[in-house]
Image (cartoon, rainbow, N blue to C red):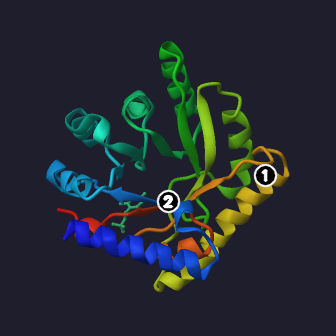
Amino acid sequence: MICENIQKINEEIAAAAKKSGRSPEAIKLVAVSKRHPVEHLMKAISCGHNVFGENYIQEVIEKKNFLQDKVNIHFIGNLQSNKAKHAAEHCTMIETIDRLKIVKAINKHLQETNRTIDILIQVNIGDDDNKSGTRKEETFKLIEEVSKLKQINTKGLMTIAPLEKDNELSRKHFANLRQLGEKAQAEGLFSKNMKIEYSMGMSGDYKIAIEEGATIIRVGTAIFGQRP
Ligand SMILES: *Cc1c(COP(=O)(O)O)cnc(C)c1O
C-alpha cells in the first residue's frame, strides 16, 4: 500500500502543479513517518522514496542509525535546546526553527565540526495559540538574527495551518505564508535571486498548498495510514 500511496500522491502533485502552472519538480514530498516502524520507511525506500519527516529525536536517531545514507530526514517536531544538536547531526533540514536560543545552540554545535545545516523558520501564520512558530510580526527579526549565524542556511518558511472545518479554509493561511516570504525578500531578508522554500500542506490539504506555492509538502497519513 505504501508504494501505491506514494505513487498516487506523486500523480496528485503533478496534477496540482500543472493546474497552477508550476513544474512538479519544484515540489518536494516529505513522507512523514513519525511513530511508524522502520519497516515502513524501508518499504518507501524500496520504491524510490528517500525523504522522510520525523518529530521525535529518539526516533530520528534510531531510524538514521539503521538506514544511514539511504534516508534524508527533515526534522518537523518541537525542538528542545538540549536535543537540538542531535537534530543537526542526523537531519538534512530542520523545518521548525522558531526561537533564536535553539538555533544558536545548533550553530555552536556545528562550528565544532565545521558543518552547515538547512533550516526553515516556522511561522504561526494563523495566530493560533495552540501552535508553535514565530508570530508573523516577529518573523523578520528572527530571520535577520539567524542569518548572522554562519553554520545555518535559512532556506525559507514553514507553517502548520490552524485546524479548519474545511480544508479549503487553509488556502488563505498558505497564501499568507507565501506573501510573508515575498515581503521578506523584498525587504532584503532573503537574497534577491534566492528561491524561497515554503513547507506547507499535509495529507488533507497538500493540493491546496501546492496551488498556493508550496515547495515542500509533509504528508503522513495519506502515505502510511493512521499512526499507531
Ligand atoms: C504529523 C505531521 C504531519 C503529517 O500529518 P498528516 O496529516 O498525517 O499528513 C505534517 N507536518 C507536521 C509538522 C506533523 O507533525
x%, y% of residue 70? 29, 41
x%, y% of residue 30? 40, 57
Choose between 131 and 166: the one closer to the eye. Answer: 166
The amino acid type of the residue labelled 2 equals Lys
Q: Label 1, label 2: how many angstroms apart (C-alpha)?
A: 25 Å
- Residue under the point 19% across and 57% down: 43
Judged by depth in the image, the label closer to the viewer, 1 or 2, is 1
- Residue under the point 77% across and 52% down: 184
Q: Residue furthest right?
A: 187
Residue denoted by label 1: 185
Query: Of the numbered discs in the image, which one, if any, rests on residue 139?
Result: none
Residue 87 in which image quadrant? top left
Neighbor class of circle 1 (other Cα within 10 Å; few <14, some 14-19, many 20+) is some
Taking the image as shown, residue 125 lies to the left or right of residue 162, namely: right
Neighbor class of circle 2 (other Cα within 10 Å; few <14, some 14-19, many 20+) is some
Residue 31 in which image quadrant? bottom left
Helix, strand or loop under label 2: loop
Which badge, 1 or 2, is on the more N-terminal residue? 2
Taking the image as shown, residue 149 lies to the left or right of residue 17, namely: right
Helix, strand or loop under label 1: helix
x%, y% of residue 77? 40, 49
x%, y% of residue 108? 54, 20
Q: For residue 203, say whether it is visible.
A: no
Taking the image as shown, residue 129 lies to the left or right of residue 148, namely: left
| CB under 8 Å between discs 1 and 2 | no
Question: Which quadrant of the rendered structure holds the N terminus?
Answer: bottom left
Residue denoted by label 2: 131
Question: Which quadrant of the rendered structure holds the C terminus?
Answer: bottom left
Ligand 1 quadrant assignment: bottom left
